[in-house]
Image (cartoon, rainbow, N blue to C red):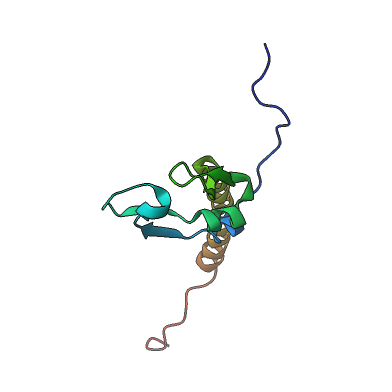
Amino acid sequence: MARLKKDIAPFTRSLDDLDKVHPIIFNWNPETSGIKSDHIWVGFSAQDVSKAIPEAAGHVLNPGTDREMIDFNLAGVVATLVNAVKELSVKNDLLSQRVAVLESLLNSSSPPINPKTS
């Protein structure tokens, strides 16, 4: 049975790359997008995504105008988010260990001297 994917390698984009992507709210421009809607949308600028996560972006033909535009696949953003969460989890674990060591040192030292009782 043949596999559907080939040339599989780890995807390493993470927190530093995610910091370059900025969530936005927007309305579609009906003249250039072909989308007519009064709805306020939430998403990302394809230009931001293409700079920060180039594997997630590509050029496509806009069906409304037959002009080339940048589009992106959310799977690349999600994969970057997963790596960022993993990176933050490791940092959180290290900080928790440091706090535990510091608390242990504080608890093992002699109690502070109260100036009113000395």
Which residue shows up at 31% across the image and 48% down it?
36
Which residue shows up at 37% across the image and 56% down it?
29
Q: Nearer the viewer, residue 15 or 53?
A: 53
Q: In the picture shown, does residue 64 fall above or below 94?
A: above
* Residue 92 shown left or right of residue 116 in the figure: right
Residue 85 location, x and y as percent? 53, 49
Location of residue 5 (image quadrant): top right
Residue 99 location, x and y as percent? 53, 61
Q: In the picture shown, does residue 24 fall above or below 84?
A: below
Residue 101 location, x and y as percent? 57, 60
Q: What is the quadrant of the N terminus in the image? A: top right
Q: Nearer the viewer, residue 58 or 74?
A: 58
Which residue shows up at 54% across the image and 61% down it?
19
What is the count of numbered marks? Answer: 0
Residue 64 location, x and y as percent? 43, 44
Which residue shows up at 71% across the image and 36% down it?
9
Residue placed farthest to the left in the image? 38
* Residue 100 shown left or right of residue 12 in the figure: left
Residue placed farthest to the top in the image? 1
Q: Nearer the viewer, residue 20 or 93?
A: 20
Q: What is the quadrant of the C terminus in the image? A: bottom left
Residue placed farthest to the front in the image? 66
Q: Nearer the viewer, residue 3 or 89?
A: 3
